[in-house]
Image: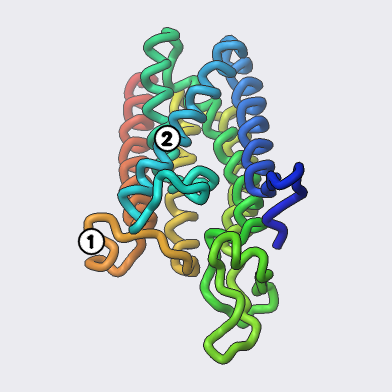
Amino acid sequence: MYPELFRIGSFPINTYGVLLALGMMLALFVAAKLAARDGLPRERIYDLGLWTLIGGLVGSKILMLFTEENVDVFSLDFLRSGGVYYGGFIGGFLALVVLMKFYKLPFWKVADAFAPGVAIGQALGRQGCFAAGCCWGKPTALPWGVHFTEHAHEFTGVPVYGPDGGSLYLHPTQLYESIAMFVVFGILVYLHKKKRFDGQVLIAYAIIYGIIRFLIEFVRDDPRGNILGLSSLLGISTSQIISLLVAAAAVVFMIVRLRKKDHVQV
């Protein structure tokens, strides 16, 4: 696709980086708007957002070290890589928990404000993945299969030719997730207006995204590591294992919170 937008001298401005930055800014804007709806200070939300993004970036790189082989932490590829999403989610979440106590803000209200922002940020971020050619899918004969360019292959290693030397068309898994997350964003914003308890939006996000990611992984084909050998043992990817755990835990938590809410109302 278009890994580079343009160059400033010899320094490339990558499409992925630009779209990721736009996604982060939009995520912060959405979080601040929703937080204000719940009576939370916007200024604090922007502060929280910036530190959460840093925690997310660090977490994504750390999980990348555990799930991928032969990672060179001192290489340019490591620095410009987006890392592993679930590592970013965990890192950002932990940063949020710590700062909640420091700023003395209600955790669940803040988490509900951030969840839709995370979804819209993912939607734009996956557009960046598509432009770069990373996170590619398995070969397909479907009419919307995508043939990536030689430039994308040089940039990310995405395969462009099949065993017979012919053009290879792949599932656009990046767009599958991007479109899905735009829909999820709309659902979460609506739920934020109708929620029955604080934390419901975040829990709903965890359930929905866990299911979406688990399903998309079946047609992804880029190397995603084999943490502790579990992927080979279970026959599913590392991300699918994490997705199942996250979604299952969120379902249990949702049931517990709803029952507790109904009990209090009675």
Residue 208 seen in the figure: no
Residue 8 is left or right of residue 98, and the answer is right
Residue 149 seen in the figure: yes
Residue type indicated by callout 2: Val
Real-space Cα separation, disc 2 to disc 1, in angstroms: 23 Å
Could you classify mark 1 by the number of other residues whose Cα lies within 10 Å: few (under 14), some (14-19), or many (20 or more)?
A: few
Residue depicted at x 67% and y 56% = 3
Percent across and percent down for residue 179 are: 64, 54
Residue depicted at x 35% and y 57% = 70
Could you classify mark 2 by the number of other residues whose Cα lies within 10 Å: few (under 14), some (14-19), or many (20 or more)?
A: some
Residue position marked by numbered label 1 in the rendering: 229
Residue type indicated by callout 1: Gly
Q: How is the image coloured?
A: rainbow
Q: Is residue 102 above or below residue 207?
A: above
Q: Which numbered dot is residue 58?
A: 2
Which quadrant holds the N terminus? bottom right
- Whichever of labels 2 and 1 marks the residue nearer the N terminus, that label is 2
Residue depicted at x 56% and y 61% = 156
Q: Are marks 2 and 1 in contact (CB under 8 Å)?
A: no
